[in-house]
Every structure is written in structure tokens, then in C-alpha cells.
Amino acid sequence: MKKNLWVLLALSALIAMFVIAGCAPKSTPTPTPTPTPTPTTPPADTVCPKVVSTEVVKTFYNGSCSDCGWDPCYNENGNGVGDVLYTNCCDLNYPTGTGAFKIIITFDENIDPIKSSCVLNPASWVIEVTNPERFFGLYAENKKLTLEDGEVSIIDVEINGKQIIVTAAVLENDSNKVTWSWPDGYEEFEYAFCGLICNTDDAKSYANVVNGPYAGTSFLGTIKAPTVADEVYWKLSPGCVVSDELGNWCCGFDGKDCCVEPICETCAPCPLEGSICQ
């Protein structure tokens, strides 16, 4: 009996040891704290504005030619054009009649109008109009029309967000000489062409103006309508600053663009190959 009791007590003690060992609560490990990432400070903008594009387009200027610095529609006596001056400048209903155009300069960020106020001064600009097929006149010193020489006139300059928009006008005013009978049968006459050559209609108008009373003929001295558009080049003076809104500025900006624009064709029933009507 005692022996059995001792056996039972030993078994009970052994079972208790297993139960206690198996049910002991496991210690909860202390979680490792996740490191807080240090926020990265973006680098400060220290780059000055850059020119993204230049676009040249014709525009209508609602004003007289005298506001542009000239008035080819009246001679010195105020009696009108007369027979010796051939021009398109007096027809305000014609697209190039006022000679006005816009240079739209787009930057990659907004321009500060106060820090960049020098661009509002016409003296800060160089503007040149070139075309290898323009006549430029008998007495032209340069084969280009420039702001410096007075053929180009700045009407207005504005800063609008990322853009600087220059409204200007251009006039080619010179003389031509056409010979219909060699050597003494010739006539010299004055002409004045307002505006840019941007399409075939402008080119035809230019040839008509330059050829004067001999438009449509092939006499010596007459010209053909240009087949290429005008190119407009602009440049800011070396000391003129263009700044962004953070005060980052640079100098020495320039650019150029060809004034090319389409026109609507009157489509024939059977257009030739290559026509826009196809």
C-alpha cells in the first residue's frame, strides 16, 4: 500500500513538473523600434530661366502707321500716296497692312516682371528680319531690316507668366528701277512694303509692291515672289537681366523663328498631286 502511494506521489510530482513547464507563459520580446526616416530637403532652385521656344506670328495693330514711327500712306505734303509710291501699308483690311507682328518668347518658369523690367525698354532689344529672297531696295546698306536702322519698330512689350511678348512692326521702304528698253528706257520709283512674308499670299503682295507699275511683267529689274518666309531674330542687350520669381537671373538671351503660316486653298474638282485639297 505504501509502495503504491509513493508511486502515485512520484507520478503526480512528475506530471506537475511537465504541466508547469509546458504552460509557463512565454516572455514577449521587446519590439525593435522602426527608425524614423529623416526627411530629405529638396535642393534650392538656383537655376535662372531658360528659353524654351520662340514663335513669330503676324498680328493686327489697331493704330495709324505714324504710331509705329512712320506713315508711308502720306507724302511730305500730306496729299496721299501719289503715283510714285507703291505700297500695301494703307490697306488696313489686308493681313500685313499694318506691318505688325508678335515675338512670343517662352521660358521654362515664370518671369519676375519687376526684376526683369529692363525687357520693357525698346533700347534693350536687337530685332532683325532677314530673307534671302527679299529685294531690300536699290539703296539698302544691309540685306536685313533692323530695329537699329529704324525699319523695325517696337510697339509694346509685356511679361505674362512664362512669356515675354514683343509686339513690333516692320517696313521695307526703298526704291526699285525697272528697265523696259535698254539702255535708256527705265523708270525708278519708290515702294513701301509693310509686314512680314509668312505665306504665298504675302509673297505675291511683296512682289506686286516692289515691281510697282510693272507688276506681272518680266522686264529687267522686276522680281519674282519669294519662295521662303521671313526669319525674325531677337537678342537682349548684354546688361538686361531676366529673372525668375526666386531671384535667379541670367543675361545674354537670344532666339529666332521663321514666320511660316498656312493659307486656305480654293480646291479644284480634280486637284493636282501634292495639293492640300487631297
Image (cartoon, rainbow, N blue to C red):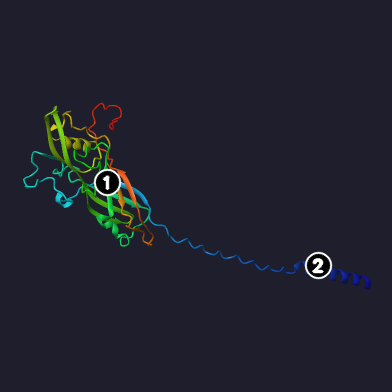
Q: Is residue 64 visible to us here?
A: no
Counting labels gives 2
Q: Secondary structure at mark 2?
A: helix
Does 26 sit above or below residue 151? below
Does 253 sit above or below residue 246? above
Q: Amino acid at mark 2?
A: Phe
Does 144 sit above or below residue 41? above
Q: Check residue 18 in the rendering and tell me which mark sits there, or answer none.
A: 2
Q: CA distance from mark 2 to mark 1?
A: 102 Å
Q: Secondary structure at mark 1?
A: strand
- Residue 247, by quadrant, is bottom left
Q: Is residue 27 visible to us here?
A: yes
Label 2 vs 1, first from the N-terminus:
2
Instruction: Report x, y in % for residue 125.
Output: 28, 53
Instruction: Report x, y in % for residue 236.
Output: 31, 53
Instruction: Report x, y in % for residue 154.
Output: 23, 52
Residue occupied by mark 1: 128
Badge 1 density bin: few <14, some 14–19, many ≥20, Cα 10 Å: many
Q: Amino acid at mark 1?
A: Glu
The N terminus sits in image quarter: bottom right
Badge 2 density bin: few <14, some 14–19, many ≥20, Cα 10 Å: few
Q: Check residue 111 in the rendering and tell me which mark sits there, or answer none.
A: none
